Amino acid sequence: MSTIAPKFRLGYFIKAVTDNIFWSIIILTLAGIPLMQIILFYVDLPVVDGELVNPFLALTWLSHPDSALPLVKALLYTDFFRIAVFPGFGFAALLAAGTIFVERKMLAKLQLRVGPFYCGKVEGLLQLMGDGLKLISKEIIIPAKADKPIFIAAPILFVGTAAAFVALIPVAPGWVVADVDMGLIGVFAVIGFFPIITILSAWSANSKFPFIGGIRALHQMVSFEIPLILSCLGVVILTGTFNLSEIAASQSFFPWIVFLPIGAIVFIICALAELERIPFDLPEAESEIVAGWLTELSGMMYGLVQLGSYVKLYAFAGLFVVLFLGGWSGPIIWPPLEEQLINDGINLGPVSAAVPGLPFFSIEFFSAVIWFVLKTAAVIFFILLPRGVFPRIRIDMLLQIGWYKLIGLAFVNIFIALGLLYAGVIGPGGLI
C-alpha cells in the first residue's frame, strides 16, 4: 500500500516556528538567566575603575559588548572554562562527535555501502544528532542480578577517566587543563584505571558474555600498556622532561618521529589495542560474544561508554601529536594583523580585541590550535582506517605481539635514543 506524503501548510509551519520561539523565551527566562547568575557567583570577576564587579552588575554588562570584554576575559581564565569548554571535555567531545560522523561515512565509502545520509540533506549530518537523542530517550535496563551500584557507576567512571586523560593534553602554549611537571607519568597513571573500570563493569553485570569480554580487555590492556610506556621513553631521554608542554615545545624545528620512527609505530599499535579498535577488538567481538563487556549496557549508559571511548581516542591521538609530531608547532597560517589595529584594540593579555566589542585570540594562538587539530585529525584517521581493511586477530596472536614483538621494538627505540644522545647528535652540545 502506498502512502501519500502530507502537504506543506504555511499556517502549520508558522505556528511551529512561533511555538519554538515562545518556549525558547520561556526557557531562557526561567532557566537561562538564573543559571547565568549562578555561574557569575563562582567566576573571579575583574576589577574595573578600582571597584570589584559584582555578579548583578556583571549580568547587566553582558548585554553591552564593550562592557562585557573584561567579563569575557575573566571567564576564559577560569578553571571551569578550561575544564568544561576548552581545551577540556567540551573541546574533546566536539572532536569525538565529528570523529563518529567521519568514521561512519569513511567506512561506508571503503565498503561500498550507504552510510548515514537520509537524516538531513547535508551528507546525513543530522543523523549523529538523531542517534544521540535516541540514546538519551531510550530506557536504561539494569539486569536483575547485577551489582547495581557498580554497574551504574562504571560508565560514569569511564567517561570521567577519559576526561582526566584529556586534561593532561596541551593544545596550545599555556592552554592545558593540568600542566604538571610529571605529565607523562600522570597520563599512564590515568590509563591504568581503564582496565579496572572495564573488569568492574563486566563483573557487575553478572552475565557470561560481559565477563568474557572483560577478561579479554584486562589481558589486552595489561599486555600493551608496558610497550606503550616504553615507546615514550625515547622521547623522554632526548628531551629530559616528563612535562608534555615542554616536550611539544622542544619540537619547534623537527618532530621526534624523524629520529624515533620505531617508537611512533609501537605507540600507534599499542594505542589501537588500548582503544579496543580493529584488529584488536576482541573484548567487543560482536560475532563471538555479542558485544563483550558492553552487552548488558543500554540507553545512555551505553552512550556514555561510547562517548568516553571516542574522547579517549582523541586523547591518544593528541598524545601522539605531542610526543612525536611536534604538538602545536607549525608556521603561522596567515599573516598577523597590522600593528595599528592591535594597538587600537583592547589589550587583555593573550586575549585582545582589534574590533570594539569583538574579543578574539592572537593569531599565534589560532595557528597553534589549527595545527594541533589538523595533526590530531590525521592521526585519528589512521587509527580509524584499520577498521575498514583489517580482520580481527586471535587472542594468542594479540598477546604474542604485545609481550614479545612490541616490547623488543620498544627497547630498540630506547637504544636509538641513547645512541643519539651519547653520540652528541641531539642534546646539550649536540649537532642539532
Image: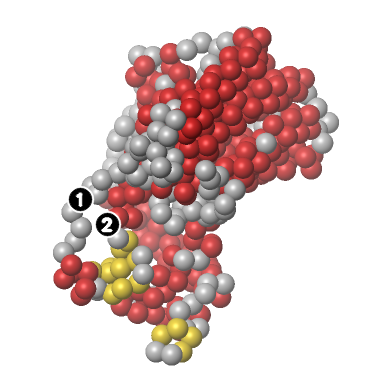
Query: What residue is pinned by disc 1?
Result: 334
- In the picture, residue 346 is in which quadrant? bottom left
**Element at badge 1?**
loop
**Residue 26 in view of the camera:** no
The image quadrant where one finds the N terminus is top left
Q: At label 1, which amino acid type do we have? A: Trp
Q: At label 2, which amino acid type do we have? A: Ile
Q: Separation of disc 2 and disc 1 at Cα?
A: 8 Å
Q: Residue furthest bottom?
A: 50
The residue located at (77%, 40%) in the rendering is: 150
The image quadrant where one finds the C terminus is top left
Label annotation for residue 176: none
Q: Looking at the picture, how far across and down is residue 264, in whole percent?
A: 46, 27
Query: What residue is pinned by disc 2?
Result: 363
The residue located at (44%, 30%) in the rendering is: 423
User: Observer-nearest residue: 109 or 265?
Assistant: 265
Q: Looking at the picture, how far across and down is residue 49, in whole percent?
A: 39, 89
Side of 369 relative to 295 (left or right): left
Q: Say if 413 sits above or below 348 in the image.
A: above
The answer to whether the residues at label 2 and label 1 have Cβ atoms under 8 Å apart is yes
Q: Looking at the picture, how far across and down is residue 382, in whole percent?
A: 41, 25
Colouring scheme, one of rainbow, by chain, secondary structure, one colour:
secondary structure
- In the picture, residue 229 is in which quadrant? top right
The residue located at (53%, 72%) in the rendering is: 43
Q: Say if 385 sits above or below 391 in the image.
A: below
The residue located at (36%, 69%) in the rendering is: 349
Q: Say if 409 sits above or below 255 in the image.
A: above
